[in-house]
Image (tube, rainbow, N blue to C red):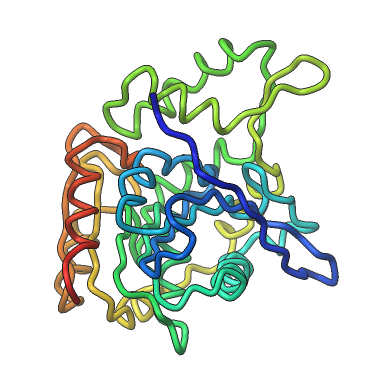
Amino acid sequence: MIPKPHRRSTVAVPIGGVLKHMAVHEWGDEKNPRVAICVHGLSRNGRDFDVLADALSRDCRVLCPDIPGRGDSDWLASVEQYAIPVYAQFVSAMLTEFGIKQYDWVGTSMGGLIGMVMAVTPGSTMRKFVINDVGPVIERVALDRIGNYVGRNPVYPSYEALFAAAQPFLSTFGPLSEEEQHHMIGTSVQHRADGMWEYKMDPKIGDAFRATLAAPEVDLWPLWNAVKQPALILRGAQSDLLSVATLDKMLSTHPNARAITLEKTGHAPALMDAPTVAAIQQFLSESV
């Protein structure tokens, strides 16, 4: 059985003059100075890391936030507020409120982009960086694919119907057991008062994503080149978001980066299989 978080906390941040709350799923000893922060992808939530967080909690305090608009966190007031700088503001508030002096970062897709911002912020205390299937170049085919579904928020008459419809989406996360598939879906949906089932995600996230697609492309290589922390880059072998060429350039431009490619996996690796969990544990345990 997949373990559940040990605790859940909230962090309050004023956004546009309104106090908004971010849920944080916590693991391990609250007094442990070794801290790992795990941040999910665009349409996911902090419960994606239950397997990894359980393993890491033997040595670390682990914090897995639901970035606002997802999971158990508040929805933000406008499309414009769903942006990386705002997400980084919530994470920074979490570090301050929880008294975090130093931390390691595990970021999947969007969580990896937030991690790049946190890594290069002046005074950053990030020690190590695990970046999961994302980089400075995001392939257009992946952007178009994600733009077609994110924030559409269809409703379903039953959990079984929702789970069946999610199968193509689940298949890109890599080989998952039936229990792992149900965990990914069960922790991401809610049963409405009218009996219908839906994902726990603000539709405005999709609007914000599609607005970004229409905006001029931003060169993220200067951001990646400013990352100095030791980095472990994970890539799904069938990923349509992080190309082999981008991965190779990331490795060549970072003096202390290594990579692992996960076979039979697309975007983005679920980080539930034992070898990948062990590789992350090993990387984080090594001295800097």
Which residue is found at the position 35% from the left and 56% from the top?
Answer: 134
Say whether residue 30 is left or right of residue 83: left
Q: Nearer the viewer, residue 250 or 58?
A: 58
Does 1 appear above or below 288?
A: above
Residue 126 placement (x, y as % from top left): 38, 75
Say whether residue 202 is left or right of residue 238: right
Rendered-image quadrant of the C terminus? bottom left
Residue that extends furthest to the bottom in the rendered view of this protein: 122
Residue 255 placement (x, y as % from top left): 15, 79
Say whether residue 86 is left or right of residue 254: right
Say whether residue 212 is left or right of residue 55: right
Does 227 appear above or below 20?
A: below
Residue 12 placement (x, y as % from top left): 72, 64
Which residue is found at the position 33% from the left and 62% from the top?
Answer: 135
Q: Nearer the viewer, residue 125 or 122?
A: 125
Which residue is found at the position 55% from the left and 38% from the top?
Answer: 148
- The quadrant holding residue 211 is bottom right
Which residue is found at the position 67% from the left and 16% from the top?
Answer: 156
Residue 145 placement (x, y as % from top left): 46, 40
Does 284 appear above or below 235?
A: below
